[in-house]
Image (tube, helix red, strand yellow):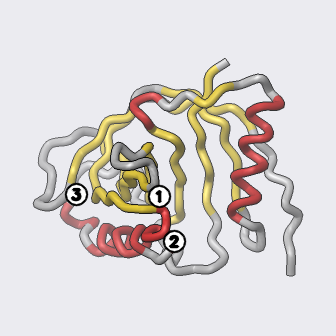
Amino acid sequence: MTVDQQNDALLTTKEAFQAIGLKWEGTFAEAGEGAIRKIQIKLKNRLEEISNIVNPDILLGLSYHATFGGNGFTHYAVVEVESVEEVPLGMISISVPTLTYATCQHRKGQNIEQSYDNMYNWIRKEGLMENNVGHLTHFEKYPMTQNPYSTDPEFTIMIPVMR
């Protein structure tokens, strides 16, 4: 079954926030082979170690431009926290500034690459520009209950933009 591939986009502003979780750096090929899914599972298994979680039902995936060779990137599997009091061993804390995002829902049955293409086309059509503050290219919000290995995930896509 194929779902309508239209992704209704809108602009949203998310206030600055702090998050705690796991950092991964690698190539796009490694990501495609499941490396990011592995750190999502690892984070889910360690959630009880993180204090002050704002929304325990949402896992955030923050992606940043690579600083090594251009064929990879840095990804953080994190949860938003009210404040950073202690960072568990092997984890990191990260701060994201207040930003405006082009936002849409990727639904079950849709093609992920097409959802992103739709978003970037909408950004251009609206006369917006990507706003890679601190090299943040996009982030995704996943239901914590979703299996990272699902071949048909649902999630929210958020791409920082400016006029």
* Of the image marks 1 and 2, the number of the one nearer the N terminus: 2
| Of the pair 75 and 101, the residue shown nearer to us | 75
- Residue at 43%, 70% in the rendered image: 30
Check disc 2 and report the residue beneath it: 32
Judge left or right: residue 134 versus residue 150: left
Check disc 1 and report the residue beneath it: 58
* Of the image marks 3 and 1, the number of the one nearer the N terminus: 3
Dividing the image into 4 quarters, which one contains the N terminus? bottom right
**Label 2: element kind:** helix
Judge left or right: residue 96 versus residue 114: left
Which amino acid is tagged 3?
A: Ile
Distance from label 3 to label 2 (Cα)? 28 Å
Which amino acid is tagged 2?
A: Gly
Q: Which quadrant of the figure has residue 44? A: bottom left
Q: Residues within 10 Å of mark 1 (few under 14, many from 20)?
A: some
Label disc, if present, on residue 129 of the rendered structure: none
- Residue at 70%, 47% in the rendered image: 104
Residue 41 vertical position relative to residue 87 in the rendered view, above or below:
below
Q: Residues within 10 Å of mark 3 (few under 14, many from 20)?
A: many
Judge left or right: residue 70 versus residue 104: left
The nearer-to-camera label among 1 and 2 is: 2
**Label 3: element kind:** loop
Which amino acid is tagged 1?
A: Ile
Q: Residues within 10 Å of mark 2 (few under 14, many from 20)?
A: few
Distance from label 1 to label 2 (Cα)? 22 Å
Check disc 3 and report the residue beneath it: 50
- Residue 97 horizontal/vertical position (percent): 40, 28
Distance from label 3 to label 1 (Cα)? 14 Å
* Of the image marks 3 and 2, the number of the one nearer the N terminus: 2
- Residue 9 horizontal/vertical position (percent): 76, 41
